[in-house]
Amino acid sequence: MDVSTLTICEAASGLRAKAFSSVELTGAVLDAIEKRDAELNAYLSVDAEGALRQAAGADAARAAGADGDLLGVPVAIKDLINVEGQPCTCASKQLLGYVSPYDATVSAKLRRAGAIFAGRTNMDEFAMGSSTEASAFKVTRNPHDLSRVPGGSSGGSAAAVAGGEAIAALGTDTGGSIRQPASFCGCVGLKPSYGRVSRYGVTAYASSLDQVGPMTRTVEDAAVLLQQLAGCDARDGTTLDLPVPDYRAALRGGLKGLKIGLPKEYYIDGADREVMACVRRAVDACAAAGAEIVEVSLPHTEYAIAVYYIVATAEASANLARFDGVRYGHRAANPRSVFELYAKSRAEGLGTEVKRRIILGTYVLSSGYYEAYYGRAQKVRTLVRKDYAEAFKTCDVLMTPVAPTAAYRIGEACDDPLKMYLGDIFTVPANLAGICGISVPCGATAAGLPVGLQLLGPAFGEGTILRAAYAYEQEVRA
């Protein structure tokens, strides 16, 4: 069975029709991983025995009359989301050998829905990076060009979906880590609003920014997965107790009458011409399909990168303090003092990019600098949030590029962190504001590299961006 183009909905339909069993479907996914992953490096670990055991249980449940869109469907999980009995290394030597004793809330929800956990996908260490080159274990490659990055930090999840090694996957998005790799690899990636999906059991990078979301082959599949993931969780006090809409039903509204805002700050000369041409064609096609296009302004966008890398690193400094060789993580051998135990354990266990961000975060939180950096960044963050609130008074969704370039070559940005950070310019503002966003493929460069179209909606406006993205995918791009 070729699973390289199979969607969640197609898999569920086949399972219902008894065209194949979950054991056969899961076996086909495992075969695809075995054949292709030596060159893609999308997975850090694969649980073949556990996946087939789960699949047999799903087949038995269907035989007994159970049903569900995810029952018996294999999915891949980013390696910072806890799944009971599976490793959760966060692509770091600091957690090498750790096996999770419990399910994250999102994992528990997928388990109850009958999803099969095929394996753990590669990522930038502790989700700190934009190319998946910062993994401590391997470099994931873009399925469209093996010499290029898949994006990050959820690059393994994107590569697995785009490369035919997973029907769908979960990623996390702190500053674009679902949307950017989805754009680079040509799949769909959805960042929910902050508070829509529980973060319990998800290793924290920046607690006020992180969100879990689906990475899929179609917008409809993203809606199916989000339906299972969304909802209030008593174990995560940042989730809001709001009704969860029927996201699949929300897909059917079409583009006619929808107001699409184009933020002038996102349409800049510095972006790649081919990328901008793809996005412009998508905008024109939406207008031809009945959408109303309006120009809006988000004047504080220029400060977003600076604000993000203060807020995110400050929170990372606090969150990663626990990985010290005493409470959690790698412990250095034969330390001569407690100080040396801490210093050597973290020096040996953590990679360069993680160390860089911890040092920067510790600095901006330090006495004498807190208000000058962190305090001021939080004030500007409020202005960014207000910009979006004003924009959504005049439009339903915003339409922008996901990234200023298509996928770049492996090694091209490693020696210039600032260049890599600036690649997040179109994605980090949404995380600062807590709003929702989705990347949907909108074409390719002359070299065949995918380009993503970003649709942003107000907080808890996932139904609207899914409607617009689905209409573009079905009515326009097709």
Image (spheres, grey):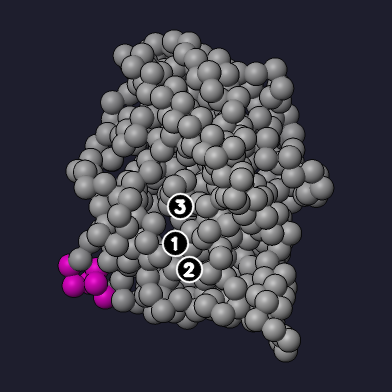
- Identify the residue position indicated by label 3 in the image: 207
Most foreground residue, 347 or 417: 347
Residue extent of the magenta highlight: 60-65
Which amino acid lies under the numbered mark 3 shown in the image of this protein? Ser
Q: Say whether residue 189 is left or right of residue 265.
A: left
Q: Secondary structure at mark 3?
A: loop
Q: Say whether residue 219 is left or right of residue 411.
A: left
- Residue at 31% x, 14% y is 257
Using the image, determine if residue 373 lies above or below residue 302: below
- Residue at 67% x, 55% y is 359
Which amino acid lies under the numbered mark 2 shown in the image of this protein? Ala
Which amino acid lies under the numbered mark 1 shown in the image of this protein? Val
Most foreground residue, 152 or 420: 420
Q: Residues within 10 Å of mark 1 (few under 14, many from 20)?
A: many
Q: Quadrant of residue 265?
A: top right
Q: Is residue 404 visible?
A: yes
Q: Position of residue 73 (x, y in %)?
A: 38, 62
Q: Secondary structure at mark 2?
A: strand
Looking at marks 2 and 3 on the same chain, the residue that comes earlier in the sequence is marked by 2
Q: CA distance from mark 3 to mark 1?
A: 10 Å
- Identify the residue position indicated by label 2 in the image: 118
Looking at marks 3 and 1 on the same chain, the residue that comes earlier in the sequence is marked by 1
Q: Is residue 22 visible?
A: no
- Identify the residue position indicated by label 1 in the image: 202
Q: CA distance from mark 2 to mark 1?
A: 18 Å
Magenta segment: does it hold 82? no
- Residue at 39% x, 52% y is 8
Callout 3 touching callout 1 (CB < 8 Å): no
